[in-house]
Amino acid sequence: MAEDKVLSIDAKKAENFSEWYIQVLIRSGFVDYSEVSGCIVYKPLAYGAWQQVVEAIDKEFKSDGIEDSCFPMLIPEKLLKKEQTHLKGFTPEVAWVTHTGDTELEERLAVRPTSETIMYASYSKWIRSWRDLPLRYNQWNSVLRWEFKHSTPFLRSREFLWNEGHSVFATSEEALKERERIISIYMKVLKEYLALPGILGKKTEYEKFAGAVETYSIEHIMPDGWSLQGPDHHYDGQNFSKAFDIKFLDKEGKQEYAFQTTYALSTREFGVMVATHSDDKGLVIPPKIAYIQVVIVPIYKKDNQEAVNAHAVKIYESIKGKFRVRFDDREGYSPGFKFNEWELKGVPLRIEIGEKDIANDSVMFTRRDTGEKQAVKISEIDGSISKIFEMMQEDLYRKADEFLRSHIHVVNTLDEFKSILKEKGGIISAPWCGNTECELKMKEEYGTKIINIPVEQPKHADKCIYCGKKAEIAANFAKSY
Amino acid sequence: MAEDKVLSIDAKKAENFSEWYIQVLIRSGFVDYSEVSGCIVYKPLAYGAWQQVVEAIDKEFKSDGIEDSCFPMLIPEKLLKKEQTHLKGFTPEVAWVTHTGDTELEERLAVRPTSETIMYASYSKWIRSWRDLPLRYNQWNSVLRWEFKHSTPFLRSREFLWNEGHSVFATSEEALKERERIISIYMKVLKEYLALPGILGKKTEYEKFAGAVETYSIEHIMPDGWSLQGPDHHYDGQNFSKAFDIKFLDKEGKQEYAFQTTYALSTREFGVMVATHSDDKGLVIPPKIAYIQVVIVPIYKKDNQEAVNAHAVKIYESIKGKFRVRFDDREGYSPGFKFNEWELKGVPLRIEIGEKDIANDSVMFTRRDTGEKQAVKISEIDGSISKIFEMMQEDLYRKADEFLRSHIHVVNTLDEFKSILKEKGGIISAPWCGNTECELKMKEEYGTKIINIPVEQPKHADKCIYCGKKAEIAANFAKSY
């Protein structure tokens, strides 16, 4: 028998989340560890899904006027040093190229941890007049951040894939207006493709991006109740334009420094997606981004293999132009083995075709997320697949959203805070005075950080739960990845 | 006036090719130099065109069963050292990461110059049985080769974009069959997208890829008569599988080393494409891959701006879902200025709309490559654009192919060789004994190398033009980039 591989996971999501998470990712063949510590291999299952996400976002970006570009992966040290806050934020994690061949370089080159500094050196050359603005370039690439903490695929990887958008505007108003559009693009793709909800909010001064004036982010919740930061948008004001001398002549002929923004969505989202939707049988991938959307498994008996196969091939041919389909006619594997394997790999829909189905002019559908089975007439296959995919997308999102909502706890006193933290975890919304001191003391004492100040503020008391001083806002506290 | 930019090139292609080449690339805004010596910035015009090429090739690859993946950009030194020929070929050009943050790494990490070694370390883990084969993964990424020669955008860049395909087969027959399919995919995309012809042939032992058994390549000719190597396919036999221990159990239960291939097409092709098709007015980009395919320029007079604009917008709206279109309604620029700018940027088709056109229910088309003008009825715009694009594609390819054919010279003696080399240059096909000694001596004496042994062999004498010994083949000699 060929059934010699380990095609199941033994850890339980509810019992041992972190072990389950690794088993789901590795045993499904979604990703694998590599020979470089902290860096993973994206196998076709993962990279194919990422290509779908890229396509979806890129389309939205382009219709908003954003253009794709590609800058060098190496950054001269002198450029990294131009903006001091940015430098402090990133240099501890930078990988340095010091030699090429046998020659030592005169100046070290950083493998990009993010591309502000190399891009803005060019922007400074290109931008002369208000006519050159807005300039809105994006990149799809990978970046390297050599963190020394324990690495976990997607959630904390030293190399990850992302988009990095870098816009330049003549006015701060335009820059701030972009934020709304970018955030709504990210929210839309998260909902309609990754089936992920999130909480939109502003980062505190302490947590904002190195070099930014304001950072807005979408925060997720993981199945273990910890939060994880999703895509973000930074309004940089004139911080970088002053450091990089990005000036333009305005309509009145006056020299002005430009206003800048940056925004990013990364493969960290795949960590949230896999953790949120998958189960003890393996991956569950939302249908629009699944690398393989449908698998067809013919069910043979000894004497009918040819007839069943011919029938199955016909169905395969009729849908393969419309969906990403695999026809699993491997010999030496039982149907049950194949079912397990494709469930482990998270293929949203399985179509079984056996002798009985042929007689009934139908096939058998099985939904990956719910396990629901349904006989479908051959003439209705296309429409039924589309309908099931729509339902699956809605169901996955609804379940994830319910989970998120049920893990946000509004409290008004420190005692409530402590008891919720101990008993329930999740995201705790509490009134906060706005001082970094309280933020850091709570971080130290309770291991929670302020993940954001949510845009949709709950009703809350007017006293900071920590210091008792006036609190005009409620902040979201959580243990965070 | 806003017309303050340099929007023309002054070097002539026929007189000063290398200066013209740089001016065309930089002044058009296709690419720019960066702050990292030898690395360029791909502006949207270039990167958008590359995205079209990627899409075209990726579709062909996928329908041939090739899957995309993504491996780490860094490679531990010990992996690079596993295959000695490969190591010798690449280490002189490797950029080494030696530090991260303030910490020196225990083992140096190479920024990938190519990914054989990091991929095959994984392949060795993944492949166990004949059931795991063929395994055919591709990557779209950028690689770094720190050459010390004078760098030229695309033709010799330290960082370039490419596909790198790495397949594993159970038999050498399958591996060799793949070559035909990959080469025909490359030839097809070169012809139908980049409008580029090439000469298919086998590399000599001296010129083949470091670690390969056989290298086949497509060789181009540049306007200056020098050749340039295009995409290639390497049959590696068991060289790497033995070095990386890539073994499988065959159907008889015997352990065998696998057979491997690799293949690549890079942004060097953009150098050939730009050099081949462009002219003294600027870029000429084949229509299917042009980032902007059509530009609409409304022609105002003082009193009809609103009417003309409204009309032009309608036409813009009607075609923007089918083609990549820009509507150039910038104020403060004359139509002539706009025409120059879009010609410089290589937009394949310009549509002018003025008062007279509105009266005639038509618009004015201008083809970028020939400058031909044509009035087109509004109801026929879509069809006419498609037709012009088809013609343009054919014309560009035919012209390039004629140029290539007219620069291949078949000779049978060393005297002929020398006189052709002096008077005409180009590619010289000559009988060759097959010995590296003659190959290298001719390289030293005449500055020509053997670019390949063409698959389509011309009639040739049976004596090596250099040593006079028996020659069973004719080889293509050329000065080469």
Image (cartoon, coloured by chain):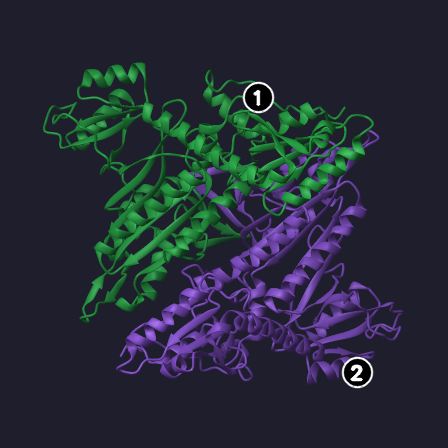
Chain colours: A purple, B green
**Most foreground residue, B46 or A161:** B46
| Residue A379 visible here | yes
Chain letter for mark 1, please.
Answer: B
Disc 2 from disc 1: Cα separation: 73 Å
Q: Is residue A29 left or right of residue A185?
A: left
Residue flagged by tag 2: what amino acid is it? Asp
Query: Which residue carries the number 1 mark?
Result: B9
Disc ID at residue A415: 2
In the rendered image, residues at marks 2 and 1 fall on the same chain: no
Whole-percent x, y for residue B226 in the image: 36, 25
Q: Is residue B122 above or below residue B56?
A: below
Q: Residues within 10 Å of mark 1 (few under 14, many from 20)?
A: many
Q: Secondary structure at mark 2?
A: helix
Whole-percent x, y for residue A430 in the image: 80, 74
Q: Secondary structure at mark 1?
A: loop
Q: Is residue B329 above or below residue A448?
A: above
Q: Residues within 10 Å of mark 2 (few under 14, many from 20)?
A: few
Whole-percent x, y for residue B233 in the image: 31, 45
Q: Is residue A42 above or below residue B301?
A: below
Residue flagged by tag 1: what amino acid is it? Ile
Quarter placement of the C terminus of chain B:
top left
Q: Is residue A328 left or right of residue A413?
A: left
Whole-percent x, y for residue A423 in the image: 69, 85
Q: Do the residues under discs 2 and 1 have CB atoms within 8 angstroms? A: no
Q: How many marks?
A: 2
